Image (cartoon, rainbow, N blue to C red):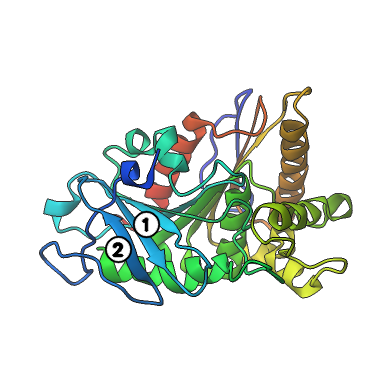
C-alpha cells in the first residue's frame, strides 16, 4: 500500500511494506448459468418472499433454523450484470444496531448511487437490532444465530446463485457501528473468506475500559434481541468466546488483508449515546491500530470530526479501495 500525504481530516498509514417491498429484490443467477434463472433454496435457507422487479436491487426473505424469524437480504448488482456475463467480487455490508436498523439501512442512505458504475455485488443482510453478528450464549426467544446465518448459510447461497468469485480475493466485508465490529470479527475468525475489511465507527476492542463494549453487547442484545439472553453471558462471560471475537486479540488474522478504519473525534457532547459510542470506538480503534503497527500490518485509518454516523465520502473512498483490492470482474 502506498502512502498519501496526510490531511487535517485523514491519514493513510502503511506499516511495513421503507418496506420490504420498497427495498426491491430480484432473481439470482446461478454461478454456472449463462442465462438468468430464479435463485433457489439451499444451504439451510428457504425463500419465503422475494422482489425481482428491479434491475439492480434484489430482495429476498428467508426461513432458516438459525434465526427464529425470517431475516431479509438485499443484493445490489452492478450495472450491466444481466448482460455482461462477467463474474464479480462481492462486498458483504453490515448495518449497525438499533430498532431502526436492518437490511434496508444502506439503501435508505444511498448505496445505489454510491455504487453506480462499480463492478461489484453488495450483499446487505439483516443482523438483528442488537445481534452483534454472533451466536449468543443464551436466548429466551428462540434461535438468533446470526453468525451461522451469515457465514454458513448466506455466504455459500450467494456464491451458488450469483456470478461471484467464491474465493478469498473475491470477497470484502464492511459495516457501520455494530456492523463494523461484525466485519472485523468475521474477517479475523474466518480468515480465508475476506481479503478486505472495513469498520466505519466500529468498535475494535471488547475488553478495554473494564469490558465496556462487551457489557454493552450483553445489555443491548438482552433488551432488543434475546429477551433477556446475552451474547457473551452474565454474570460471567464465556471468556473463550470473547477472545475469539475480539479484534485486538486477533491481530495476526489481519495480515495480508486490506484494513480500513474510520472513527469520529468530536461526538455531540449533549448526546450521551453519540458520545459514549464514538468515544469508545475511537479509543478501541487507536488500540487496534497500535497493535497492527507493532506487527507491521498495513492499514488505512481516518480520524475525522463528528460523532457516530456514516460518512458517505469515506464510504465511497473505501469502496474504491475494495474494488482495487479484490479480483477484477
Q: In which quarter of the image is residue 36?
A: bottom left
Q: Is residue 97 left or right of residue 21?
A: right
Residue under the image location 71 percent in, 64 percent down: 231
Q: Which residue is drawn at 71% across and 53% down?
A: 223
Q: What element carries label 1?
A: strand
Pointer 1: residues within 10 angstroms few (<14), some, or many (20+)?
A: many
Residue 207 position in % (x across, y down): 82, 57
Query: Residue at coordinates 53% horizontally, 72% vertically from top-left?
Result: 148
Q: Name the residue under label 1.
A: 90
Q: Which of marks 2 and 1 is nearer the N terminus?
A: 1
> Considering only vertical position in the picture, is 115 above or below 126?
above
Where residue 104 appears, x then y in whole percent? 43, 44
Q: Quadrant of residue 277?
A: top right
Asked if one can make out residue 166 in the rendered structure from this viewpoint, the answer is: no
Q: Residue at x 66, y 52 (%)?
A: 224
95 left or right of 139 in image = left
Q: Residue 136 carries which label?
A: none
Residue 316 or 62: which is nearer the viewer? 62
Amino acid at each position: 500500500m502506498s502512502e498519501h500525504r496526510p490531511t487535517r481530516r485523514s491519514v493513510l498509514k502503511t506499516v511495513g511494506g421503507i418496506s420490504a417491498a420498497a427495498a426491491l429484490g430480484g432473481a439470482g443467477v446461478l454461478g454456472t448459468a449463462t442465462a438468468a434463472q430464479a435463485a433457489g433454496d439451499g444451504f439451510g435457507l428457504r425463500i419465503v418472499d422475494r422482489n425481482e422487479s428491479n434491475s439492480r436491487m434484489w430482495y429476498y426473505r428467508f426461513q432458516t433454523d438459525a434465526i427464529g424469524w425470517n431475516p431479509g437480504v438485499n443484493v445490489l448488482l452492478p450495472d450491466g450484470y444481466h448482460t455482461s456475463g462477467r463474474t464479480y467480487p462481492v462486498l458483504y455490508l453490515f448495518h449497525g444496531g438499533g430498532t431502526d436498523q436492518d437490511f434496508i439501512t444502506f439503501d435508505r442512505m444511498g448505496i445505489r448511487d454510491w455504487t453506480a458504475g462499480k463492478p461489484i455485488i453488495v450483499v446487505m443482510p439483516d443482523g438483528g437490532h442488537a445481534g452483534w453478528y454472533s451466536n449468543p450464549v443464551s436466548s429466551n426467544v428462540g434461535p438468533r444465530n446470526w453468525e451461522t446465518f451469515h457465514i454458513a448459510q448466506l455466504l455459500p447461497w450467494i456464491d451458488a446463485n450469483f456470478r461471484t468469485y467464491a474465493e478469498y480475493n473475491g470477497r470484502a466485508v464492511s459495516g457501520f457501528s455494530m456492523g463494523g465490529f461484525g466485519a472485523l470479527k468475521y474477517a479475523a475468525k474466518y480468515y480465508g473468506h475476506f481479503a478486505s475489511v472495513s469498520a466505519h465507527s466500529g468498535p475494535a476492542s471488547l475488553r478495554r475500559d473494564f469490558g465496556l463494549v462487551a457489557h454493552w453487547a450483553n445489555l443491548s442484545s438482552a433488551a432488543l434481541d434475546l429477551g433477556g439472553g446475552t451474547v457473551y453471558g452474565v454474570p460471567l462471560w464465556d471468556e473463550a468466546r470473547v477472545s475469539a471475537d475480539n479484534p485486538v486479540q486477533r491481530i495476526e488474522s489481519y495480515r495480508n488483508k486490506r484494513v480500513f478504519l474510520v472513527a469520529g473525534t468530536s461526538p455531540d457532547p449533549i448526546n450521551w449515546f453519540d458520545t459514549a459510542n464514538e468515544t469508545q470506538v475511537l479509543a478501541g480503534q487507536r488500540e487496534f491500530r497500535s497493535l497492527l503497527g507493532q506487527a507491521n500490518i498495513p492499514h488505512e485509518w481516518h480520524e475525522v470530526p463528528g460523532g457516530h454516523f456514516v460518512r458517505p465520502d469515506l464510504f465511497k473512498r473505501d469502496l474504491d479501495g475494495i474494488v482495487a483490492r479484490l479480483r477484477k470482474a
